[in-house]
Amino acid sequence: MRAMRLTAWGQGPVLTEVERPAPHGVEVLVRVEAVGLCHSDLHVVDSTPGALPYRLPFTLGHEVAGHVAELGPDAGGLAPGDRVVIYGPWGCGECSRCAAGRDNYCDRRGGLDRHGVGLGQDGGMAEYVLVPSARHLVPIGDLPAEQAAPLSDAGLTSYHAIAGLRHTLGDPASTAVVIGVGGLGHLAVQILRATTPGRVLAVDIREDALDLAHRSGAHFTTPVRDDTAHVLRTRTGGVGVDAVLDFVGNGATLDLAAALLRPGGELALVGSGGGRLTVCKPGALPPGARLSLPFWGTRPELAEVVALARSGALHVETEQFPLSEAPEAFARLRRGEVRGRVVLVPE
C-alpha cells in the first residue's frame, strides 16, 4: 500500500510503498477514508534530530477517519465496516488517566517514544492504519470522512480548550475572543456558538480568514491593527473580555490577549507560535487572570464533538487533495495558502 512517510528529519516526507499491516491481539485495522493535515505535521517534519523521541521512519497523519477493515482475534466492540474516527493521542494505556480516556495527559507521556497515531507511530497518510486497541476508535455513523477526520484534532483541541473556559462564559453578556481563524479557530467559533450563550469576537491578519470567521458565526470580526485591543475592548463597554483563545501563540498575539482580558479573565494558549508571556504580579495579565495550556482533548470529548457535527452544529471548512498530491498540500500549508483544513483522500 502507499504511505506518506517521514524518513529523515528536516526533509519532506516521501510517498512510498509499504506492506499492509495485519492486526494481532486486540489491534484493529482501519481502511483510511480521509486524513487531515495540520501545522503539527510541519513541526514534526521540520524537527531536528533528537528534538523528538520518535524513531524513523514512520507514516504521518494523526487526524484519521475510515472504516474497520479487519479485527485482531482478541478485539471486540466493533465489526468490519463500522465507520470510525481515530482518537489520536495514544498514551501508555496503563495509568489512571489513560484508563479514563485522557491519554492526552498521560502520566508517562514524557517517557514514551511515540505520542500517538502519526506521531512516532505509523499514522493515517496511507491506505490503511493499524490501531492498537478499539478504545481509540469513536463511531461516526454516516458523517462524511472528510468532515470527521479533522474533528479528531482541530475539532477536539478547540472543544477541549473551550470546555476549560465554560465556567466563565455562562452569561449571555460574556465575551470570548478567538485569535487566529484557521483550521482550529474557525471550529472554535462554531463550538463557542453551539455551547456558550455569549458573544464571540474573532481576530486574524487575513481577510479571507475573517470572512470564514463570519460564516462560522462570529458576532464581530476585525483585522490585526495597532488599535485592535481598543476596538475589541470597546465592544465590551471598555471592561475587557472574559476569555481569549489564542490559536497562534506568538509574541504579538500573546500581548494582544493580555491587553484584552478583564480582571478574572481566562487565557487559553493553544497555538505553538513561540511567543513568551511573563507571568508576574503585577504584570501584563490583569488581577485574577488564569492561564491554561490545553493539549488535544479526551476520548469522551471526541465523542461529544462528533455528536455536535452530526447534529449540524459543526462544519469543517476543507480543501481536499488526493494522497498522491500530499507534497503539494504540504507546500500550500507551509506557504499559508490553506483556508480551513487540508484533507488528504487515498485514491
Image (cartoon, helix red, strand yellow):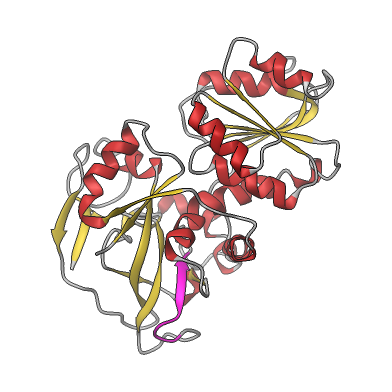
Q: Which quadrant, please, contains the C terminus?
A: bottom left
Can you name the residue that lies furthest to the top here?
226
**Does 82 appear in magenta?**
yes
Q: Which quadrant, please, contains the N terminus?
A: bottom left
Can you name the residue that lies furthest to the bottom here?
73
The correct choice, above or below, for 92 with respect to 222 in the image is below
Locate residue 345: give its quadrant. bottom left
Locate residue 262: give its quadrant. top right
Residue at 56% in and 40% down:
185
Can you name the residue that lies furthest to the left here?
17
| Residue 278 shows in this picture | no
The correct choice, above or below, for 144 with respect to 89 in the image is below
| Residue 51 drawn at (x, y percent) | 32, 38
Q: Nearer the viewer, residue 97 or 101?
A: 101
Left or right placement of residue 65 versus residue 288 in this view: left
| Residue 227 shows in this picture | yes
| Residue 87 drawn at (x, y percent) | 48, 63
Read off the magenta span: 79-86
**Does 168 appear in magenta?**
no
| Residue 168 drawn at (x, y percent) | 80, 40
The correct choice, above or below, for 285 with respect to 89 in the image is above
Left or right placement of residue 153 versus residue 303 in this view: left
Mark count: 0
Residue at 47% in and 84% down:
78
| Residue 8 drawn at (x, y percent) | 17, 44
Residue at 39% in and 85% down:
80
Q: Nearer the viewer, residue 138 or 326?
A: 326
